[in-house]
């Protein structure tokens, strides 16, 4: 009935990446020039109230009314089984205050040259509230982040998506009073808005099915999950800090690596660095911490 | 085409159009969620003293349907009432085992045609005034995932009722066993 945030973010990053494949410069829109008085005073975080998710199965029932009914019933059964399988992981994470840790990470990493120290950090629970908060910026500089963490539908990866925008990111009201983007094209955004997607993937070793995988991730009070959360916050925080301090420069001879996205599809990017068994891959507007040679 | 199939098709199309028309939050009326059945036979044999705490970060919000937030400000009060109706509470007796029930999560999520509601509570208990908790407490979950046929308030409310019923059945059964074991 409606598309979820995962689809939106993936569509955005894939489309943006495709655009970038045709026109390789700029690697990221230039950061707007900001003076002390125009630093961002608001940081908006879209974080829907829920537990760690598993992406929804996408069933093709073949079209038509009968197809829609088949899709509905199949999706319902598959979704129910998936939710049951990850329940032990979710139970192990009760009490883990991801939201406050996420906000703290942002406070520690967003540069004070761009964001005021006393900036108002607001967590929004849905798209409607998020868009209204963007209208309220009324031309002031701000930071907006769509954040999501989930397992992919096939339980191959735990992933963290963070789509960050900075600058004159506010929305305006159209003639019907509905929020619409102030700037639409890259050309319009140039020098006013910058955006980048920071992603962190954690592949799951195959142990024979959802339940077995869930048992591994929920072992020792969910320690593997908590470690992944901590590492993702560190990686994403590190990337935000670095990206806004020094423009990303990708050497021409950088090794190439294909990255398969949890939602399907793959793109090739440039390896910026490796750390242990993980590698940092840049694909136009995305910075992705993934596993080395992940498939 | 049989009439019932035609009606279903029309309802599906209408529900789709309504769902796509707005991102405005959907506020459930109080009557959308009915009280759960709690017969005398379902009551726990142990008499508990219950302390209820809502730990959710946004107590008005029950997750999202599509992109729309579901708002039900009465949920905390409703859940506490169902909890007390299900457990045999005896607050006046100082010897009653004390249960601290913390509501950790309650949220909707959707796929294209299905709707899920998850509710999660953790419980710590004490017998003689000292908490015998195991961090983060015993965790109980209720969940419903089904096809959402027409998306009305009462249908949405039924998801909440089913999930809460499942949680309360698990919670009361397990806590009663624990209480009986301690008594022996």
Image: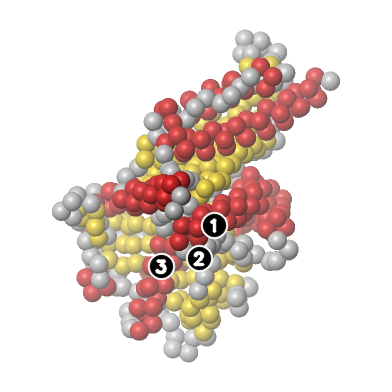
Does residue B103 appear to the left or right of B127 in the view shown? Answer: left
Q: Helix, strand, or loop for circle 1?
A: helix
Label 2 or label 3, whichever comes before in sequence order: 3
How many residues crowd mark 2 within 10 Å: few (<14), some (14–19), many (20+)?
few
In screen coordinates, is A291 left or right of A8? right
Q: Dot 3: within a 10 Å radius of its alpha carbon, few (fewer than 14), some, or many (20 or more) residues?
A: few
- Which quarter of the image is occupied by the N terminus of chain A? bottom left
Q: CA distance from mark 1 to mark 2?
A: 9 Å
Query: Can residue A137 be seen?
Result: no
**Residue at image point 38% right, 52% down:** B13
Disc 1 and disc 2 on one polypeptide chain: yes
Q: Quadrant of residue B44?
A: top right
Residue at 41% x, 67% y is A11
Q: Position of residue A146 (x, y in %)?
A: 40, 57
User: Mark 1 or mark 3, which is nearer to you?
Assistant: 1
Examine the rendered structure and indicate whether residue A123 appears above or below residue B101.
Answer: below
Which residue, given by chain and number where applicable, does mark 2 sit on?
A62
Nearest to the observer: residue B142 or residue B39 = B39
- Depicted B39 relative to depicted A23: above or below: above
Q: What quarter of the picture does the C terminus of chain A occupy?
A: bottom right
Per the image, the residue denoted by label 3 is A11
| Label 2 to label 3: alpha-carbon separation | 23 Å
């Amino acid at each position: 009935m409606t598309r979820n945030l995962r689809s939106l973010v993936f569509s955005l990053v894939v489309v943006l990446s495709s655009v970038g494949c045709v026109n390789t410069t700029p690697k990221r829109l230039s950061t707007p020039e900001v003076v002390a008085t125009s630093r961002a005073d608001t940081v908006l975080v879209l974080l829907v109230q829920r537990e760690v998710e598993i992406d929804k199965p996408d069933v093709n029932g073949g079209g038509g009314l009968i197809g829609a009914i088949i899709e509905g019933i199949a999706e319902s059964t598959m979704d129910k089984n998936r939710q049951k399988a990850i329940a032990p992981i979710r139970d192990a994470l009760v009490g883990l205050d991801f939201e406050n840790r996420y906000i703290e990470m942002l406070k520690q990493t967003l540069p004070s040259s761009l964001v005021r120290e006393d900036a108002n950090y607001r967590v929004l629970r849905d798209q409607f509230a998020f868009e209204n908060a963007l209208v309220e910026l009324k031309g002031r500089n701000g930071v907006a982040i769509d954040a999501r963490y989930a397992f992919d539908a096939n339980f191959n990866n735990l992933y963290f998506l963070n789509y960050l925008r900075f600058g004159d990111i506010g929305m305006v009201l159209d003639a019907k009073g509905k929020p619409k983007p102030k700037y639409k094209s890259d050309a319009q955004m140039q020098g006013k808005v910058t955006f980048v997607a920071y992603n962190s993937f954690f592949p799951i070793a195959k142990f024979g099915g959802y339940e077995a995988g869930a048992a591994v991730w929920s072992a020792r009070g969910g320690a593997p999950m908590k470690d992944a959360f901590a590492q993702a916050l560190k990686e994403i925080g590190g990337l935000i800090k670095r990206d806004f301090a020094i423009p990303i420069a990708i050497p021409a001879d950088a090794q190439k690596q294909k990255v398969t996205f949890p939602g399907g599809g793959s793109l090739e990017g440039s390896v910026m660095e490796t750390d242990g068994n993980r590698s940092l891959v840049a694909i136009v507007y995305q910075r992705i911490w993934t596993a080395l040679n992940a498939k | 085409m049989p009439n019932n199939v035609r009606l279903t098709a029309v309802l599906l199309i209408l529900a789709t159009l309504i769902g796509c028309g707005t991102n405005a939050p959907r506020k459930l009326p109080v009557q959308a969620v009915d009280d759960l059945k709690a017969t005398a036979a379902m009551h726990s044999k142990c008499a508990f003293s219950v302390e209820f705490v809502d730990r959710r970060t946004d107590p008005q919000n029950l997750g999202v349907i599509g992109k729309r937030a579901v708002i039900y400000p009465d949920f905390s009060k409703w859940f506490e009432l169902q909890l007390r109706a299900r457990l045999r509470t005896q607050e006046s007796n100082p010897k009653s085992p004390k249960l601290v029930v913390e509501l950790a999560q309650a949220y909707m999520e959707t796929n294209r045609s299905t709707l899920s509601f998850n509710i999660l509570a953790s419980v710590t208990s004490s017998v003689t005034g000292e908490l015998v908790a195991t961090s983060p407490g015993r965790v109980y979950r209720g969940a419903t995932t089904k096809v959402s046929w027409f998306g009305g308030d009462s249908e949405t409310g039924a998801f909440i009722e089913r999930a809460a019923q499942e949680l309360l059945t698990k919670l009361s059964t397990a806590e009663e066993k624990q209480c009986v074991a301690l008594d022996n």
